[in-house]
Image (tube, grey):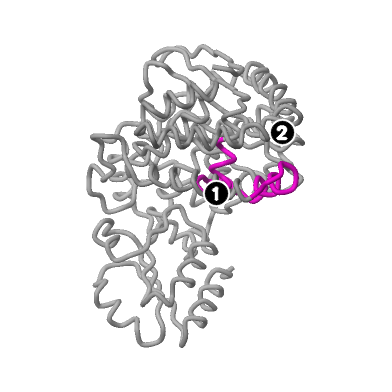
Amino acid sequence: MKGLALLAGLCCWGGPVEFRFVASELANLTFQLDAMAGMGEAEGEAYRALWRQELRWDREDDWQLERWKSLRRRQKTRLEPGRSGAPVRAVAWPPNYAGYYGQELGLDQDVRIAGLQAGSEKDYGRRLRRLLERREADGLVSVVKHFRPRFGRFWQTEALGQLRPKALQFEALVRKHDIAALAERLAVFSESKLGPRREAWFYLIAHPARFGKATVATMLRNHAPVELLESETPEERLAVIVHELVHYFYDRAPLERHMGLIAEFEAATPAWRMAAYSYLNEAVATAAQVLVERRLRTGADFGRWTASPRNVYSQPWVAALGLASYPLLERCLEGQCGLFHGFAGRYLAAAETALGERVAHPHFLLASRVVLTAGDELRAASRLFRERVPSIMHATGWEQLARFPGLPVVVLARDGEQAPMLERIGPGRNVTVLTGKTAEAVEQEVGRFAMRP
């Protein structure tokens, strides 16, 4: 394995955790291919512009990228052999972590991780053939071989020089600010069940800022590609890395603990408790992120940074709840409570103090929801609702009503079409109805709802 690694000992909960920061050519190339093919979370346009304007994109490249996309699509909907992605237990509320839905079992993640880990084309092929049929694995390798010569020039002249020093700087920061000890306490707080090799891998991805500045960092089990702009320093991204790591810890808690936590929130009294639960995963990860920022910044600088919630998180509800939760999380990390014992009530109180009357805001109450439309003509209105009204869990379709009987419902309909829909939904549900004379009028109504102060 080519890369740079930091081993930081964590005692008290099962052995050391290894924080590994990796600057890898194949990780960057396979990440770019997925982004350009629309197969990951990253925005692909910046990479498409890089290839068109600087790496001599041609018609053969169009065909090869389409081939990559076709091969990768086959893994998107397939699970590991012998495993099921169906929820293991019916619940009224949608659980707020990916593991419940079986997403961590998908071959898609395995294939992405293979590309991140591979030290050579030969190694990439070996890893893929453990997961896929040989023809499918060889197809992905051949696409990588097609693009790699030109990508190699970009890697050698630009990306490697950016990423290798930053990997070393991340290592130094983790040591200087004792991030390993913080990670230990966060894992204990989350009751994470980690494997015998406790490793967290972060693959640094060179994002060409001249073509766009939108970056992502996403956890794939205990692996995370982290896009970096040339101008960004490790000090600006270390907290985001810990944020993503906490999502992994949260996901690795036992199922029984998660089910008990949902029951605890269900038994609470606030009418907005489902929304608070929906945001809990992000709130905890953001609170951990804030704790890292406090370690990295001076007192005055930290005060200025927290004064603007958008510095904390771009989604306003997550920013507010994360800021409200970080003092609580800090006390819990000192031993006062854990995620599954004593945290829920404290979190609800902190949320009410931070949000005040806004706990009743319709956007907050629709943190998790199912959207139902009266006909295909309203698909655009449904997409607009998803884009403009922030959420943690957005579902569509009637089957979701039976799957999550406690889920709030949004009805989008033209005038007169809502009555049979409401009858079908039945009594006892929290329902928001947006109507208009035409499909365009419904879209306008969605826009007005999204702008509600």
Q: Residue at x 66, y 34 (%)?
A: 151
Mark sitting earlier along the chain (2/1): 1
Q: Residue at x 71, y 39 (%)?
A: 303
Which secondary structure, mark 1? helix
User: Where residue 176 appears, x then y in whole percent?
Assistant: 67, 17
Estimate how packed mark 1 is, as few (under 14), some (14 to 19) or many (20 or more) residues with alpha carbons within 10 Å.
Answer: few
Which quadrant holds the N terminus?
top right
User: Where residue 97 appears, x then y in whole percent?
Assistant: 39, 42
Which quadrant holds the C terminus?
bottom right
What amino acid is found at the position of numbered circle 2 in the picture?
Phe
Residue 8 occupies which quadrant of the picture? top right
Q: Residue at x 55, y 13 (%)?
A: 7
User: Where residue 71 appears, x then y in whole percent?
Assistant: 43, 43
Q: Nearer the viewer, residue 360 or 150?
A: 150
Label for residue 63?
A: 1
Q: Which residues are magenta?
A: 30-58
Label for residue 154?
A: 2
Q: Nearer the viewer, residue 170 or 378?
A: 378
